[in-house]
Amino acid sequence: MAAVIDDICNKAFSKSFMLFKPEDLNVFDLLKFLFSPKLHERKFVESSHPAEFNFAHRILIIITIIVLKLLQLFAAPLAFLGFVVEFSLNFLSANGGVFGLLNIFRLKLKLPDSSSADYQSIVGYMDERITLDQSIKPGDANYNAALCMMASKLVYENEARVTKIVKDVWKMEFLGFFNFWNEYIKKSATQAFMLRDKNSVCDTIVVAFRGTSPFSAYDWMTDVELSWYELEGFGKVHAGFMKALGLQKSVGWPKEVNRKDKNQPLAYYTLRKKLTKLLKENENAKFVVTGHSLGGALAALFPFILAFHQEEFLLQRLEGVYTYGQPRVGDSKFGEFMLKTYSQYKIGFHRFVYGFDMVPRLPLDDKASMFKHFGPCIYFDFFYKAKILEEEPFKNYFSMMGAVMMRTRAFMELGRSLLIVLIKGREYKEGVPLRMMRMFGLFVPGVNAHCPQDYVNSTRLGTKGFLVSPP
């Protein structure tokens, strides 16, 4: 996260870096940067380079730092809005809907408990399905893809709800729910859970990372910042996502850390320790990592840190990486390293993209930036039909033709939301919260296509008869 940056830099750690500090922003300094390339004189950015001569990149940095500052300023109001929206939805559900509010005259209204298994997030209300697709069986080529997407959606919920659904609905072993500490914002911000799917065909541990919480300004800050580290032999990697995993520039990403406060666990180290213990206890078990949105970025980077730390045991037991609507996480050199690592350890990498989802098209892949996707894209069109592409259509979000196509598609998806239940059945019914998001997509194209609903539909409808296999 860009909110707080340590001033101490381990010079032996990274070849070069650029980190943003919106808390140190002042307008005069920002305007000077527009006409002067001198980076080392700017308080709002920390960089190993003394200057940035690319004018287009300077504009991109200015826009980014302004967005980060605005998100920082509106973090509390956005969180409060999220509380109001989710509490209101759960309040209506607990009381049987709008007509149930008539119980106020009988003094029987129920107040929802945010820590209970019945309390849903806004993501849960946009897609209320909790059961797995019974037509996709263990051993099917697409079984892991469908299971991982449901896990990627479920991880947005609270611990009680996740535990209940994994145990009582999916009939699987629940292995833990985690809230991880972020040193840069001094709070828990990264969320994940683990389950074990042991059946007659496989013995798989699933690690699911939560994506961007819609009402978390800190998650959005992680998504939009363009900070990076460049490591010798590994290329450039997105700094914000690495911070969310608990990796810190100031200490050089050590293989081991000693945390004095056990209530402030760091994501990568905690999950690595837990996985090592579980896999040593279960010789035949393997594991997969997955996530939607920001969670997809963390899932894609987790194997990178394992390779960076030469964790041979875990890499040999890693069966696959499944990401849904994942943003770009590194440059072309980083991608080459990851593909080589996946090939060496026979790890399947599956990057799913639905339609005109805006998030896989960020950060931009252009001359002013250096972020690129790696590996093929499993792309789903409007009809949830899958095909393998090198890159999703209109690879960058800011595109004139892309904007027209995205709005056209948003209209089509709004119409489909009214008809899909008639065509595919009640399992695919879309409620009011999702339809409101569909309408919002008419004004902010691409945001509606990022909802988990379309990715669940894609893995259930689009992959049938389509072999999801390692690249």
Image: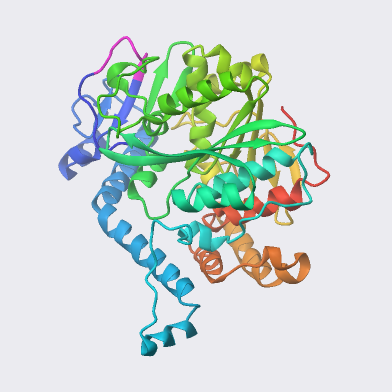
Report x, y in % for residue 207.
Answer: 54, 35
Disc count in the image? 0
The residue that appears at 64% across and 19% down in the rendered structure is 283
Residue 321 lies in the magenta-colored region: no
Quarter of the N terminus within the rendering: top left
Q: Position of residue 390 (x, y in %)?
A: 68, 33
Please tell me in which quadrant of the rendered image residue 326 appears.
top right
- Left or right: residue 383 compared with residue 290: right
* Residue 15 included in the magenta stretch of the image: yes
Residue 309 versus residue 324: which sits nearer the camera? 309
Closer-to-camera residue (112/120): 112
Q: Is residue 247 left or right of residue 307?
A: left
Magenta segment, prevailing SS (helix, strand or loop): loop
Question: In front: 112, or 312?
Answer: 112
* Residue 355 in sight from this viewpoint: no
Dividing the image into 4 quarters, which one contains the C terminus? top right
| Magenta-tinted stretch | 9-16
Residue, far right? 465
Image position, residue 75 (x, y; %): 28, 52
Q: Residue at x 29, y 24 (%)?
A: 259
Q: What kind of colouring is applied to the model shown?
A: rainbow
Estimate the x, y position of residue 400 in percent, counting from the top left.
54, 52
